[in-house]
Amino acid sequence: MSYHKLRPVLLSRDGVRLAHVEAGPVAAEVPPLLLVNGWTGDHGIFTPQIAHFSQSRRVVAVNLRGHGSSDGPQQDYTMAGFADDIAWQCAQLELHKPVVIGHSMGGRIALELCGRYPDLASGMVMIDTIIMPPPILRESPGVRALLEGIGGPNYLLVLKANAWELGCDFEDPARRKMIYETYVRPSCERTPQHVAHSMIRNAILNYDPVPAAEACWIPMAYISADVPLVNMARDLDRLQEICPQLVIAKTMLAGHYNTIEVADQVNAMLDRFLTVGLRRCRG
């Protein structure tokens, strides 16, 4: 299965087309997977996971509003708004009790979805997500520079440079470039500036993940990578205080796009969570 062979399907919500791709059989004995892309990404970041898990279960990968093949109207882009879209898509697709898996900011959206709609999912996994950044991060020069850059005339240069750096340099240079050119850069270039700027601004300045975490009782896992910025800003200790059912794992020597870079590691961890971790509910 290749990224380019995955054909998005469009559903219209109040005149806005929301895209998803789907693969695999409907199997009543196992929960389906619901995959949520991150900031300026799309379903392509999950290509190996779609290929692997669709052999045994239904897999649906959404394109967030304003991302991939979904429409990007002029509006505010918030974690709550994305969660509402995905809940609507689940209802339309009759996706019953999925395990929600979010990459990067998709993990924040997954948390908001599962806290906002506590009966929707059977489990949740966040992959290399800055989930609970310290308040001081909002005032940091790096964050200010990023927001100014994403809102400025050199938007695409700033966005693509940020995406490249997150990949880190563990891989052979040729393979690192292939991953970036195939799975990362195209979706960056398709994301309208107003979508990217509104989403990152609201995520950093206006979103508090604590209420969603407090409302989330389902089994939960976090898979990290070796990205210094994410490791510094995610505060998994705080999340585990609120959600003691959280289990934490780490891929070895991989950057932010570990779903592609070390897909075998990620798939093995997800397999383990599906077979064992789904029994770890919050007490």
Image (cartoon, grey):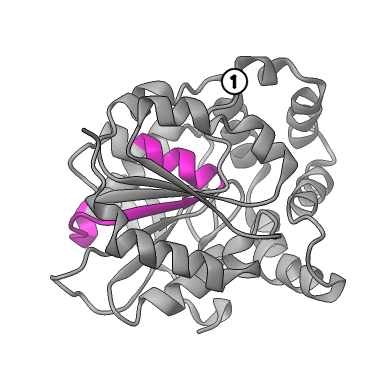
Residue 188 visible in image: yes
| Position of the C terminus by quadrant | top left
Report the residue at 29% width, 33% height from top: 216
Residue 36 percent across, percent down from the top left: 44, 53
* Of 124 and 37, the residue lying toward us: 124
* Of 154 and 116, the residue lying toward us: 116
Instruction: Establish if 67 lies above or below 48.
Output: above
Instruction: Establish if 3 lies above or below 160.
Output: below
* Of 156 and 50, the residue lying toward us: 50
Outermost left residue: 28
Q: Secondary structure at mark 1?
A: helix
Report the residue at 50% width, 29% height from top: 237
**Does the magenta-highlighted stretch encompass residue 108?**
yes
Report the residue at 26% width, 56% height from top: 98
Residue 141 percent across, percent down from the top left: 82, 21
Residue 33 visible in image: no
